[in-house]
Image (tube, rainbow, N blue to C red):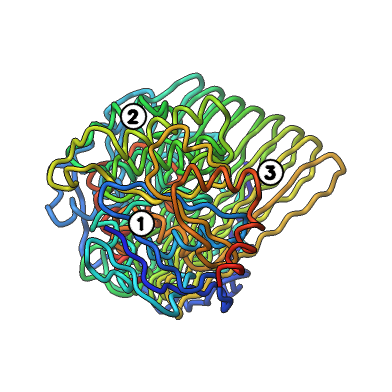
Amino acid sequence: MLELENLSIEVGGKQILTNINLSVESGYTNVLFGPNGAGKSALLMSIMGFSGYKITNGKIYFKGEDITDLPLNERAERGLGIMGQRPPNMVGVKLKDLLEITAEECIDLDELVEELNMSSFLERDINVGFSGGEIKRSELLQLAAQAPSFYLLDEPESGVDLVNISQIGMMINKLLHGDIKCAGRRRKEGNSGLVITHTGQILDYIEADKGYILCNGQIMCSGNPRDLLNEIKTKGYQECVTCKIRQS
Amino acid sequence: MQDQTELRRKALKALEKKAAYGDDFELKNYQVTSEHMSNYDSLEEIDDETKQTLLNVGVIPSGKERSGTLIMTDNSISHSSLSEDSVELTSTRKARDKYKWFDDYFWKLVPVDKDKYTAKSYLENADGYFIRAPANTKTSMPVQTCLMLGSKNISQTVHNIVIVEENAQLDIITGCATKKGVEKAIHLGISEMYIKKGATLNFTMIHNWSEQIDVRPRTVVHVEEGGTFINNYISLKPVKSIQTYPTVKLEGKGAFARLNTVAVAHPGSELDLGSKVLFNSPETKAELISRTITTGGKVIARGEMIGNAINSKGHLECHGLVLNDEGVQRAIPILEANVQDIELSHEAAVGKIAKEQVEYLMARGLTEEQAVGMIIRGFLDVGIKGLPPELEADINDTIKKIGESSI
């Protein structure tokens, strides 16, 4: 479904990611662990195609197609969708107006709005004055309306209180593994995703298939996500670096 | 009784006086008489082309959903009618003949010798609209007026007087337009508005001139205790130049003013749009909001707040988008506090559309054009209500073209 091949990324002239090889098979949800500043967000932003993340080497393949040089909207058209960490304040752009344009025909928008408790935000400018949890819900609402087949989720649990986290977690689970309403856009196996998590909390809500650890701009190792999380919890990320050195 | 001899003397003296801002014009190069008269006894007589022109500046040609209509073409009144008797609408000259007290409102706010344009308007005995809302009345629908340029090389001089008596509420929509085929012309407009104790005036002005028209309005608004003045100024279409600096005097406790300016400077346009508020009484409040875009023209957004009375509060917001390298945005906010207990603030920002905003929308599947269009629409949306759908559609079309041209 998604394949990164020797991907190297520069931000502001500085190398952030080096030779990333990563793949997410159709119907899989893979998880990306890593300490702050490891380059996790940069990786997701590059996959979506945001400028400012310069690909200096390597390729991004999506559904077998080389999308390395495609603009964002064409990637979105092909089924990629992102839930960002720090989306910009969209002064003057009302949530409702955007949803009206982006929502897929098969989506019951009213139901989604209710489910995410977002009805009082529809007339508001997107992200302007939203709290951390509200931003996440708004992002999730937009993403659900867009109905992508591949979800790029950047720390969906960060800055969210306990009540919101279960709401968000369950929604993400439903989007990734739930009923498929939009026939033709998705595969039988369900949707796929690449989820960044710092704390691993989101794993209480979703079934993850494979985990990767990203440190210092490099993939350190991959494996069963729960095993990796346990390792990280007991030994910390420093161990990953040491382990990598030992391996080489 | 005002001494007209004195006013005349002052006006004559100021005939060559250049304005403080904007390009100067030799007024004797323009004519004052129309090529042909436009007189509409009934609104149904208006031809289709003119109807469309009216619609594009928010004036409904049928007069429906409006409590009154006045159309001025060049220097004479082409039409005046009322569908509601809770408001008074007539020409300034007729009102002058009718009311003994008229001179109490005539050239009392705008000085005749401010510059050559005010002087000329006085000496031409400029006509215009006179709108008065009697005390404690509320019109259910807005009064609409249109100031139209109908002849080549004309100099249109207009003198409008608006009086909103105590506790009355009035909405006015004024459209400024140019008939097809009129190339070069100049519009000079004097407006004196009086908002009395507890009264509200909601004034919306929509401009749709053309590439070779120069516009020099002179407006002063006087707001008494507890009065409210809301002003929406919309100019999204090409014009050669506009230089205006409407001044609002908050002269009674708790008076409030909000001035929204929404404008686009097309290539070849120079828009010098200011607004000034004088806080002359305690607890007065004002907001000046300016949202301008250049697609190649020049914008000067002046905002000025002068605090002369305690417990007053004002905020000034000047945001300018530059969508073309040829375009110029100059924001000039001025705040002046002359007493200690006052709160005046401003925020000004000029620059291009933030790329992260465009990309945010593109990541949701919008094309770059759609994304830019959506951001521009939001930028220009200051919540002006009551515009006819035809105008809304025209505004959307203009925004779409601006979006396309900026990519």
What residue does disc 2 label? B141
Specify the subunit that label 2 lies on: B
Callout 3–callout 2 Cβ contact below 8 Å = no
**Quadrant position of the C terminus of chain B in the picture:** bottom left
Label for residue A162?
none
Same chain? Circles 1 and 2:
yes
The secondary element bearing badge 1 is classed as: loop
The Cα atoms of the two marked residues, 1 and 3, are separated by 38 Å
Q: Residue at x 32, y 64 (%)?
A: A3
Q: What is the total number of numbered labels drawn onto the structure image?
A: 3
Tell me the quarter of the picture where residue B296 sits: bottom left
Label 1 sits on residue? B363
Rendered view: B179 above or below B287:
below
Locate residue B235, reporting x and y percent: 40, 58
Q: Is residue B100 left or right of residue A35?
A: left
Secondary structure found at label 2: loop
Q: Are marks 3 and 2 on the same chain?
A: yes
Mark 1 vs mark 2, foreground winner is 1
Location of mark 3 (residue): B314
Quarter holding the N terminus of chain B is: top right
B26 over A26 or under it: above or below: below
Give, as a three-letter code, the residue at label 2. Answer: Met
Is the C-beta separation of discs 1 and 2 under 8 Å?
no
Instruction: Give the number of the mark in front: 3 or 2.
Output: 3
User: Considering depth in this image, is A115 or B1 the residue closer to the camera?
Assistant: A115
Q: Residue at x 50, y 64 (%)?
A: A219
Q: Secondary structure at mark 3?
A: strand
Which residue type does callout 1 highlight? Ala
Horizontal and vertical percent position of residue B377: 37, 53
Seen at 48% across and 34% down, the residue is B99
Cα separation between marks 3 and 2: 30 Å
